[in-house]
Image: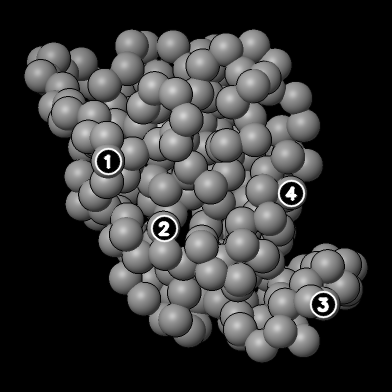
């Protein structure tokens, strides 16, 4: 299954997609139980996981990469999503408290530039949370869902990548232990799969989550000439 924004939207409307959304959203809330008055940025296709946080954050914005495409969000009120190059984030330095990266790292060809830009826009005490397909899980081995698209990661690979880009991993979690099948009997037992998997088979989760902070005293990158940041128009209403 490709990672086009329309395919992602359609997947999360299915029964299996709704289960996946709930399990991943629960894991995100375990890592970030409190987002009161914070400025939150989601990159990739984060909207299924940000809808429940809108009431508590100071500001929530979703950014979808140019290669992915963009769809309007949220359904009610003003549009909160934009389209931009993930290697040129249209935000000021130190302006974001939390960055959620989901359906982005595994498919981008700009992993390094994107993480450098996230480092730049994060506030001093800010946190990055990466959700990525688990290389050892069954979801990454089947292309019938978005988690089978792109490059999956193990927990150690993801942590190493973050350290290489001047982040310090501070926490991990796993989610999505239910098999990627659409049979009703499996979907109805999703909660049991999650409990059993987290306790006995954490290595085989569908996704891994790594939370990281920025290394404030890391060696600065060489100075470079400022670049014009490319920002696309917000998604039109009525899509």
Q: Which residue is mark 4?
A: 26
| Residue positioned 66% across, 48% down in the render | 25
Q: Position of residue 143 (x, y in %)?
A: 42, 81
Residue 9 marker:
2
Q: Which residue is mark 3?
A: 189
Badge 4 element: helix
Q: Quadrant of residue 150?
A: bottom left
- The residues tagged by marks 1 and 2 sit, at their Cα atoms, a distance apart of 15 Å
Query: Which of the two marks, 1 or 4, is nearer to us in this view?
Result: 1
Q: Quadrant of the N terminus?
A: bottom left
Q: Are marks 3 and 4 in contact (CB under 8 Å)?
A: no
Residue mark closest to the camera, 2 vs 4: 2
The count of marks equals 4
Residue on which the image places disc 1: 238
Question: Which of 83 and 79 lies nearest the eye of the viewer?
Answer: 79
Circle 2/circle 3 CB separation < 8 Å: no
Q: Is residue 174 above or below residue 212?
A: below
Residue 231 picture quarter: top left
Q: Residue at x 78, y 42 (%)?
A: 30
Q: Element under label 3?
A: loop
What residue do we see at 71% from left, 84% from top?
184
**Element marked by disc 1:** loop
């Amino acid at each position: 299954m490709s990672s086009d924004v329309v395919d992602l939207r359609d997947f999360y409307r299915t029964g299996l997609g709704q289960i996946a959304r709930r399990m991943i959203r629960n894991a995100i809330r375990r890592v970030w139980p409190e987002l009161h008055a914070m400025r939150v940025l989601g990159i990739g296709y984060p909207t299924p996981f940000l809808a429940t946080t809108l009431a508590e954050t100071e500001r929530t914005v979703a950014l979808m990469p140019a290669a992915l495409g963009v769809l309007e969000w949220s359904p009610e009120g003003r549009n909160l999503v934009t389209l931009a190059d993930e290697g040129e984030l249209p935000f000021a330095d130190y302006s974001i408290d939390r960055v959620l990266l989901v359906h982005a790292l595994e498919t981008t060809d700009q992993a390094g530039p994107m993480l450098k830009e996230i480092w730049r826009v994060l506030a001093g005490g800010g946190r990055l949370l990466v959700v990525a397909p688990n290389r050892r899980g069954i979801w990454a081995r089947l292309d019938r869902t978005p988690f089978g698209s792109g490059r999956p990661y193990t927990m150690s690979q993801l942590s190493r990548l973050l350290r290489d880009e001047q982040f310090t991993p501070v926490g991990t979690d796993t989610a999505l232990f239910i098999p990627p099948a659409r049979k009703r009997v499996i979907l109805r037992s999703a909660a049991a799969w999650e409990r059993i998997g987290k306790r006995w088979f954490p290595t085989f989760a569908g996704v891994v989550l790594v939370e990281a902070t920025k290394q404030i005293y890391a060696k600065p990158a060489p100075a470079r000439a400022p670049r014009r940041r490319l920002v696309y128009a917000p998604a039109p209403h009525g899509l």
